[in-house]
Amino acid sequence: MKDNTVAIIQARMTSRRLPGKVLKPLCGAPLLARMLERLKHVRGLDAICLAVPEGAAHDPIVAAAPNFVRIFRGDENNVLERTYKAARYMNAKTIMRITSDCPVFDPEISGDVLRVFCNSNVAYARTAFMSGYPHGFDTEVFSFDALSKAHHEARLQDEREHVTPFIWRRPSQFPMVELDYRPNRRHWRLTVDTREDYELISKIYDYLYPQNSLFGLRSLEDLFNANPKLLKINHNVDHPLLLGTPGATI
């Protein structure tokens, strides 16, 4: 693996549609703790950093953070800057990014994305945008050099409010690779942004967590095959797709 690979996870309390979602309970622990519990099992990571906004509103996240993560506080709205400064604070050479509201992502798949990045001559690797793995499995890996260039050159508002658009919009400048999957499960919404999302994720945990705390994609496929009505809980929730994202698919 490339030296000093760090997962940097953005977490805040002020989500618009479901405030405080990262601390909602899942099987007796905060959602964020469950997410980080899984992240700890991604092979190839050297450290985990929570990039939390400054301000008292977000202090509960710091208080709830497990002792195996480092904390960095930064600007709430300039997420690109917060991530860049967190990476610099951690002396990261390679950065993995998974969003904090995705507590059922599969650590093995995220590890696969990291291995693809490390074995390819690219600046950016991720699960595919438009097909393949469910929403909620999204994993990005990129070099500190790419992140630094984005931080210093990005001017558009949406390229500051998010971490990687500056990178994936410029594939000629930042060679990239996507990890795809069949059968296509991209229509499964396994992230938490609304009450309906949280209801689904809670039921998933109630079914699967007691038997296997690190349940993965195969367990989810079996669960939904046996209980197809589960996916109807949040099927009406809008989920914007990121368009215009060219890249090699493997």
Image (tube, rainbow, N blue to C red):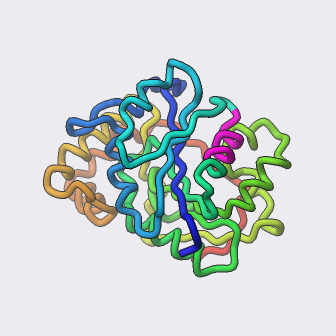
**Residue at horizontal 32 percent and vertical 42 percent from the top:** 201
Q: Quadrant of the C terminus?
A: bottom right
At 74% from the left and 40% from the top, the residue drawn is 160
| Quarter of the view holding residue 223 | bottom left
Q: Which residue lies furthest to the left in this view?
A: 211
Q: Where is residue 126 in the image (x, y as percent from the top left)?
A: 58, 64
* Magenta stretch holds residue 150: no
Q: Please tell me whether the stretch drawn in magenta is mainly helix, strand or loop.
A: helix
| Extreme residue toward the top, this view | 56
* 244 lies left or right of 86: right
The stretch drawn in magenta includes residue 84: yes
- Count every numbered label the image shows and give the total: 0
- Pick the front one: 185 or 114: 114
Residue 187 x %, y %: 46, 53
Query: Residue 10, image x and y in percent?
Result: 54, 41
Looking at the image, which residue is at 18% across and 48% down?
207
Residue closest to the eye, 135 or 53: 53
Q: Where is residue 118 in the image (x, y as percent from the top left)?
A: 58, 76
Does 211 sit left or right of 97 as displayed?
left
Judge whether 95 appears above or below 209 on screen.
below
Q: In this view, does 248 lie above or below 27?
A: below
Residue at 61% in and 67% down: 125
Q: What stretch is highlighted in magenta?
A: 78-86
Q: Decide: is 73 above or below 102.
A: above
